[in-house]
Amino acid sequence: MSKLPVIVGVGGINAAGRSANFHSYKRMVAESLTEQQMQDTWKDLALSMGLCDNNEPVTEQVIAQIIEGTLIRRIDAFDPDKLEVNTKVADSNSDSNETLYKSMTAPMAVTSAGCIPAGTDIDKQYKSINHPRGLKLTVFAASDLLNTLGLSWQHIINHVAPDQVAVYAGAGFGQVDDYSMMGLVASPLKGRRTSSKMLPLALPQMPADFINGYILNNVGTTGANLGACASFLYNLRQGVIDIQTGRARIAMVGSSEAPVTPPLIEGFRVMGALAEDHQLCKLDGSDKVDNRRACRPFSTNAGFTIGESSQLMMLMDDELALALGLNILGSVPDVFINADANKKSISAPGVGNYVTMAKATALAKGILGSEGLSQTYVQAHGTGTPQNRVTESHIFNEVAKTYEISSWTVTSVKAYVGHSIGPAAGDQLIASLGVWQYGYIPGIKTIDHIADDVEQSNLDILMQDKYVGEKGDQIKAVFVNSKGFGGNNATALVLSPQQTLSMLRNKHGDEVVDKYRQDNAELVELEQARIDKREGQDPLIYQFGTDVMGPDSVQLSQDSVSLSSFNNKINLPDGSEFNDYLA
């Protein structure tokens, strides 16, 4: 029987804050939550942003600073008014046509981005010497996940063979900053030394390598499945397949990207993809750019807004999650990926996303029934470009018509955190899980109207937060959609924790699930007590040079491999699954 991959933990950081304990989600719907519900989130952000220490209260003034320094805003990772450039000038001392290069600064045409909360300094939290920013975000995200699981990683790994853990994580662009690819290319031109670390640390699968080598001590399956803006869902699919087929019992999946750099911003700008300041001013009839409203999905808009993010998720097979009593935040029955076929251009939209959405909706109907299908909503790719608003809305509207959904709720969290490329669907998915904790679907609050060319006869595109019951109990599933550059389309069906437990009760029986609920209640109580006693934030996990294994750590036999750092051995394949093909 196929295993159901359940979500037992999340971790990460984006412009709304960190993902664990749903802080980033809560920042998005802060206006809809009570002061008491927001208290721990304001405190967490204040500590991260260096606005107070653990013993100081979070005042109204501090909250105002948090609001100003989170979500999409004017770029504060560097000064967008003083971009270093070289310009050609004629050599006045020469009769030839030779030109020289003069160093100068110039303002950027794009000044909006979804930077992580202002003042957050990951460098101070672990020894991050010469690490590219995307890998620093990876260390933060993995630590955020592990620190909040409720059980230690060592306790968890003792319940499985060491090769039954899979890690799939990468970056759409790799790492592109002064410590990686950008430094490798630019250092000779700027008279700087090229470091031996720049090339290897630029590789797109490096987030997975860092997690394996410095955080999990993992010897299981690993890799990075890249699909441009759909990369998070590509990696999620790999983890889902491994758990469904029994190749892994645990999978950490995700993506990390730090694209708020001048070269990448300029690259997207010349493609016509980003919302430039002058375009936003024209939309508003103003001479001052509204950075906060730069991303306007499904409304009159001009382009997307770049963001940085790292999002990781831990999946387990249902049996292991129940046995350990871990939090079950939802489950992922499947992730569908389809290409666009022949295209007029690589950047043009195609037919693949119709296929992924149709497959995911059909699966949801099979699991939930027609009535249950009406209790779902869509987390759109929703980039904020004129092309996306037309193409994606048409896909959703046609699928809604086909499955007789009269008013399908649609939203997009890129309005809050921007487009983080590889981790974008992770931003969407983790915000969706928050709905099942606090009951509000985040609306697209940067818009005041839906554009005339948006298809919406069967859609309810949210412009405000929507309440869907205590712990979101009116929603049984969410569709997380991605439309990646080059025709990389992906749609994930994610079931609510309530729906997941109902299905697990049918499969495993009342006794098993009741025991799980008891174990989980104890785990939640212990975790809350730990949070109440801690001072400041949890330390980042980065184990450089510890528990390193070598040849003496390995014991081989014909049917197993034993490693010194693990209690359980790795069983070797015996080929029995091919007996039907053998004489």
Image (spheres, rainbow, N blue to C red):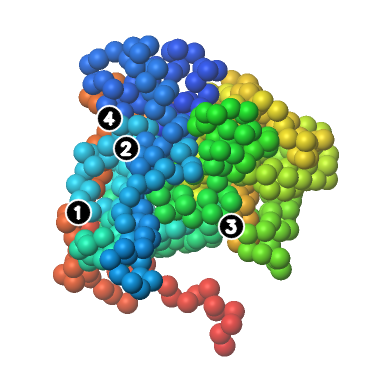
Q: Nearer the viewer, mark 2 or mark 3?
A: 3
Q: Could you give the CA–CA distance between mark 4 and mark 1, rounded to whole angstroms?
A: 21 Å
Residue named by callout 1: 544
Q: Which picture quadrant has residue 353?
A: bottom right
Q: Tell me whether the residue at label 4 lies in contact with that at label 2, contact meaning CB atoms closer than 8 angstroms.
A: no
Query: Is any atom of residue 1 visible in this view?
Result: no
Return the residue nearer the eye: 306 or 102. Answer: 102
Q: Nearer the viewer, mark 1 or mark 3?
A: 3
Q: Tell me whether the residue at label 4 lies in contact with that at label 1, contact meaning CB atoms closer than 8 angstroms.
A: no
Residue named by callout 4: 537
Q: Nearer the viewer, mark 1 or mark 2?
A: 1
Q: Give, as a three-letter code, the residue at label 1.
A: Phe
| SS category of the residue bearing label 4 | loop
Q: Nearer the viewer, mark 3 or mark 4?
A: 3
Query: Label 1: how many residues lie within 10 Å, few (<14), some (14-19) or many (20+)?
Result: few
Residue named by callout 3: 485
| SS category of the residue bearing label 3 | loop
Nearest to N terminus: mark 1 or mark 2: 2
Residue named by callout 2: 147
Q: Residue furthest bottom?
A: 583
Q: Position of residue 481 (x, y in %)?
A: 62, 46
Q: Position of residue 59 (x, y in %)?
A: 34, 12
Q: Position of residue 161 (x, y in %)?
A: 35, 58
Q: Residue at x 33, y 72 (%)?
A: 95
Q: Could you give the CA–CA distance between mark 4 and mark 2, rounded to whole angstroms?
A: 10 Å
Vertical comparison of 345 with 526: above or below: below
